[in-house]
Amino acid sequence: MNGFESFIAWRYLLARKKTGFISIISLISIAGIALGVAALIIVLSLMNGFSKELRTRLVGMQGHIWVSSILDGGGMRDYEDAMDTLESIPGVTGASPFCVYKTVLMGPSKQNQYAAVDASGTDLSTIGDISDIRDYITDGYLDFSTDEDGIPGIVIGWYVAQNLGVYNIGDKVYMMGMLDEDGMNDILGGVMPPLIPFRVTGMFSSGYYDYDNSVVLIDMKKAQEIMGYDNKVSGISLKIEDAFAAEKYTEQGGLIEQELGKYPYFSSNWIVRNKTLFSWMQLEKWAAFIVLSLIILVAAFNIVSSLIMMVMDKTREIGILKSMGASKASIQRIFVYQGAFVGISGTLLGSVIGYTVCMIQDKYRILSLPADVYFVSAVPVELQMSDFLAITIVAMLLCWVSSVYPARKASMLDPVDAIRAE
């Protein structure tokens, strides 16, 4: 900034009135900008926090990548060799086989208490390498052992338990066995597939409704027995160091294809499976950004009004400056600098307020949530530098644009007419 122009701008901005206070309109402008900036920072941080929590729980339950085969009815033979190959790929931190099939689970009473579920055969020796399922167990344990009667254990989602009327660890549930090729005809003929008893050994709540309402976990060997898989699995789940690099592994010609070959394997990742969900969340974030930016826009209109009033109040001084040799560009910069001062002050104040509120919430968890309704016990926040930069740029740009018109009007004043006006 030019020293002369910035000095005059600062003196005009801090011009004392008869009351001894700075212009009330300038204060309102600063407060409005600070409010808008703080609101944007807080709201976007909250949305980032919820998105991160959801993303963490999604990938924390099932891993990042799933590799399957198109042969043998979708089963994968010799999966141990495939696991060894996949674990050798750079960036892969864990691998675990799984067997999954859709079935119906019935409650202890077997009367109008049933749920359509995805039964997931789980390998206890490797599940910890790709999943945080043990962290989400709310009752009981991740245990598939059989009791003295030979009934195996099952771990069910919290909403599945509610639908089945299961309230205690040890309750029995009954799983419908797999249908053979003539299974549908048997059902239509009144012959039901066998019901396999299980003993509830644990309940989990991941916070993701679709998962907690549809997934049950059983021992992988038991799943293989029910599905008729002889040394086969449905696929292999992988966990990688950088979850957002998943597409680099699964894309055509990616790392998995380079190691396993293209046929008969195919792979998918968590980003593709949840693309619609996260696209919606990103759209919602942008919508909130645009709507809350209107607060800053309203404050920017206050800058226009305050600068116009300033020009009217300083008409004589502007005429004197121009008669002393000040150029139109200098006069215009004086008032642009005033708008910049207001914008910088409001933006810095709002940033401090927003950052402080977010840090207090992140550290002390003041705003709590009912854990039985939401998947977190407190409102999560995540501060992102990209959001700070975007908010700062938008705020400063609006303040600069708002000061252009009054500054240009001031620069167009004729010095003689300006002095005569007084």
Image (tube, rainbow, N blue to C red):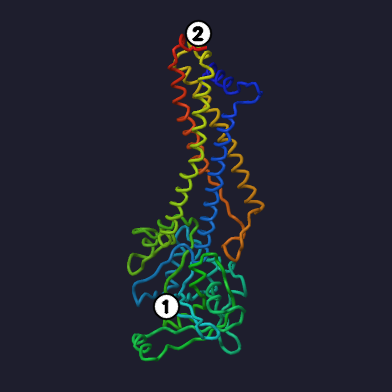
Residue at the disc numbered 1? 232
CA gap between label 1 and label 2 equals 92 Å
Q: Secondary structure at mark 2?
A: loop
Image marks 1 and 2: residues in contact by CB distance under 8 Å: no
| Nearest-to-viewer mark from 1 and 2 | 2
Residue farthest to the left, as pictured: 263
Place of residue 419 in the rendered image (x, y in percent of width and height, measured from the top left): 50, 10
Circle 2 residue: 324
Amino acid type at image mark 1: Lys
Query: Where's residue 338, x and y in %?
Result: 53, 25
Q: Nearer the viewer, residue 38 or 66?
A: 38
Q: Residue at x 51, y 20 (%)?
A: 312
Count residues near mark 2 (Cα–Cα under 10 Å), then give few for <14, some for 14-19, many for 20+.
Answer: few
| Residue 256 x %, y % | 39, 62
Q: Quadrant of residue 187?
A: bottom left
Residue at far front of view: 421
Indicate the secondary structure of the residue bearing disc 1: strand
Does the rendering let one see residue 130? Answer: no
The amino acid marked with disc number 2 is Met
Q: Earlier in the sequence, mark 1 or mark 2?
A: 1
> In percent of the image, x 46 and y 73: which residue is there?
98
Q: Residue at x 50, y 20 (%)?
A: 311
